[in-house]
Image: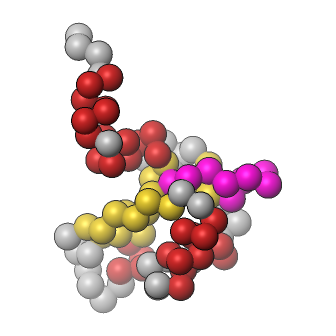
Amino acid sequence: MYDLFLLETPDDVAACALSGVFDFRSVETVECDNCKLAVGFWDESFIPFSVVIDHEDDDTPLARAYPICIDCIAPAIMPGLWFSTRKEF
């Protein structure tokens, strides 16, 4: 089972940390696990991202937190928009 959290603001990151999902505030640089794009707090700005939690091993859910940029997670959070703008080959 997976959980998906969308972090659009620094307040969302704080809520994520307080709820025990993952504390990205303590990590200096966060990258998308798929494409390696910098996300989160970067150069005095905030780049929105998502966090996918894999509950395969319930003993260590925090060890399986994957940050994913908005571009990479777009098909999951906006499937209609992604499908309608996809080019047919």
Q: Judge whether residue 19 can be spotted in this image.
A: yes
Q: In this image, 46 relative to 32: left or right?
A: right
Type of secondary structure dominating the magenta stretch: strand
Tell me residue 17's x, y (percent). 54, 80
Q: Position of residue 15 (x, y in %)?
A: 53, 77
> Is residue 67 visible to us here?
no
- Residue depicted at 35% across the width and 84% down the height: 60
> Residue 55, relative to residue 58: is it above or below?
above
In the displayed structure, does residue 30 sit left or right of residue 59?
right
For the residue pair 13 and 68, the one nearer the viewer reads as: 13
Residue at the extreme top of the image, as rendered:
89
Q: Position of residue 54 (x, y in %)?
A: 30, 69
Q: Which range is magenta?
A: 41-49
Residue at left offset 54%, top offset 46%: 36
Q: Residue furthest right?
A: 44
Q: Pick the residue in front: 78 or 32.
A: 78
Q: Residue furthest bottom?
A: 59
**Quarter of the rendering occupied by the N terminus:** bottom left
Image x and y of residue 21, in percent: 44, 78
Magenta segment includes 24: no
Name which quarter of the figure residue 29 lies in.
bottom right
Point 59% across, 61% down: residue? 9
Q: Residue at left 54%, top 57%?
A: 8
The quarter of the picture where the C terminus appears is top left
Q: How is the image coloured?
A: secondary structure
Pick the residue in front: 78 or 67: 78
The number of discs equals 0
Is 76 on the left-hand or right-hand side of 70?
left
